[in-house]
Image (cartoon, rainbow, N blue to C red):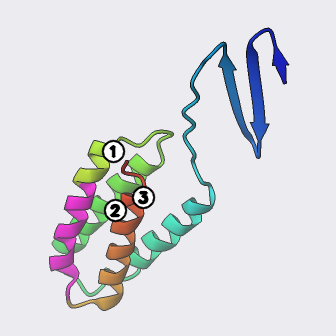
Amino acid sequence: MKNENVTINVHSGQVNFAKDKGIIKPIYNDVVNSNELDNIIKGIMGNLSGLNEEDADKITYAVDIVKEELAKPEPKPYRLRNYVTLIAQMFKIANKIPTLTDNLQKLKDYITTYIH
């Protein structure tokens, strides 16, 4: 729709609004990925029983802060970079539990998709 140098585009639930020669920089938040994140987290949390309590708590804390940041409308890339580093440290804890290690890698890869 165009009206007096104003353009409004609607596409698949996304609305773009620009006036005159405005620049649009859309940010996409893919709802499908929330299911993927939930599955990754379930895979991590379901494999903590082979760890001592302190190590399980470290991984739980790391997962919780990542989940909290990713739930925000605009996750901060600098925080996500720090969380990738934190998750990488968890590999040492999880090295004898292959499923846990695999899910931590999936979480690390998932976080990386949000870093620009």
Residue 11 picture quarter: top right
Image quadrant in which the N terminus is located? top right
Type of amino acid at the residue the image marks with label 3: Thr
- The magenta region covers 83-95
Position of residue 100 relative to residue 23, above or below, is: below
Query: In screen coordinates, is 66 left or right of 95?
Result: right
- Asked whether 116 or 83 is in front, the reply is 116
State the CA–CA distance, disc 3 to disc 2. 16 Å
Give me the disc on residue 113.
3
Percent x, y for residue 63?
Answer: 34, 62
Residue at the image point whose x is 26% and y is 52% from the top: 81
- Asked whether 78 or 34 is in front, the reply is 78
Residue at the image point whose x is 36% and y is 87% from the top: 99
Position of residue 107 relative to residue 73, above or below, is: below
Query: In screen coordinates, is 17 left or right of 39?
Result: right
Q: Which residue is mark 1?
A: 77
Q: Which residue is mark 2?
A: 63
Q: Are marks 3 and 1 in contact (CB under 8 Å)?
A: no
As for residue 32 lying within the magenta part, the answer is no
